[in-house]
Image: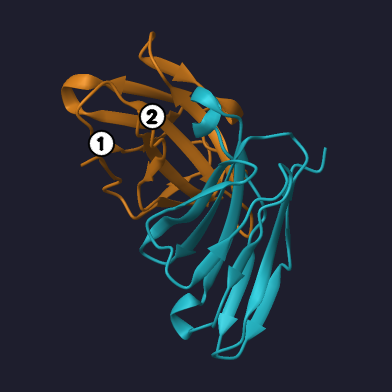
Chain colours: A orange, B cyan
Amino acid sequence: AQSVTQPDIHITVSEGASLELRCNYSYGATPYLFWYVQSPGQGLQLLLKYFSGDTLVQGIKGFEAEFKRSQSSFNLRKPSVHWSDAAEYFCAVATAGNNRKLIWGLGTSLAVNP
Amino acid sequence: NAGVTQTPKFQVLKTGQSMTLQCAQDMNHEYMSWYRQDPGMGLRLIHYSVGAGITDQGEVPNGYNVSRSTTEDFPLRLLSAAPSQTSVYFCASSYGGQGIYEQYFGPGTRLTVT
């Protein structure tokens, strides 16, 4: 069965530091992968997606993610974090076929120190 | 565009009461879904709809009903509220096909059942 693991429940970084949020997935075929962000008190917003092609994908707000098939990973990165990036980040993998759904990780909460 | 709207933002119910959470979207999206978000459990799919008149169950459908009489609206009904249904509820919508995974979320309804 498909699954998504986000190993870090909570991460704190200093403003201006680089960021990497980890995501590992379990899926039998080539996965569709996503990162969503949830700001406090808000709904989720799509940051970026991977369907195929270039394994390094760019998203909104300066984020990028790299798909590594050999490691079953899709880690999210940002070179310099801003205080406004404090939020909850969710990785998701999509199921294919007739029963299309997103399988969600449990999320990583990011705090940014000034 | 208003995007995805949800009402109410907050609600307190007594055990056994019923209510309807409203969700509407103005993007002509085919796909709509309801999630609940609980601490430590991430997002769980309650019900979804792939178009007007078509609904199906997600992971945690018990105690909830949905209908989709129009493309725009997808209300979620709690039949007899229980404390276990205390949660934050999100409605999401997306285009069909591969776009089904790029979901637009509403701001959420925070429900407390006492």
Q: Quadrant of residue B94?
A: top right
Residue in the image at 51% along x and 77% along y = B86
Q: Please say whether residue A83 is visible from this viewpoint.
A: no
Please state if A8 lies on the left or on the right of B18 as rendered. left
Q: Mark 1: which secondary structure?
A: strand
Chain holding disc 2? A
Q: Position of residue B31 (x, y in %)?
A: 58, 39
Q: Amino acid at mark 2?
A: Leu
Please state if B47 lies on the left or on the right of A19 as rendered. right
Q: Position of residue A65 (x, y in %)?
A: 40, 25
In this view, the residue in front, A18 or B15, is B15
Please state if A61 lies on the left or on the right of A7 as rendered. right
Q: Position of residue B63 (x, y in %)?
A: 47, 73
Specify few, some or many for label 1: CA neighbours under 10 Å numbering under 14, 14-19, or 20 or more.
many
Residue in the image at 50% along x and 40% along y = A36
Q: Using the image, determine if residue A67 lies above or below residue B72.
A: above
Chain holding disc 1? A
Residue on which the image places disc 1: A25
Measure the alpha-carbon separation of dots 1 and 2.
9 Å
Q: Quadrant of the N terminus of chain A?
A: top left
In this view, the residue in front, B35 or B71, is B71
Residue in the image at 67% along x and 70% along y = B20
Q: Please say whether residue B67 is visible from this viewpoint.
A: yes
Using the rendered image, report if marks 1 and 2 lie on a common chain.
yes
Q: Mark 2: which secondary structure?
A: strand
Q: Quadrant of residue A22?
A: top left
Q: Using the image, determine if residue B64 lies above or below residue A95.
A: below
Q: Amino acid at mark 1?
A: Tyr
Specify few, some or many for label 2: CA neighbours under 10 Å numbering under 14, 14-19, or 20 or more.
many
Q: Mark 2 and mark 1 in contact (Cβ < 8 Å)?
A: yes
In this view, the residue in front, B68 or A101, is B68
Residue on which the image places disc 2: A33
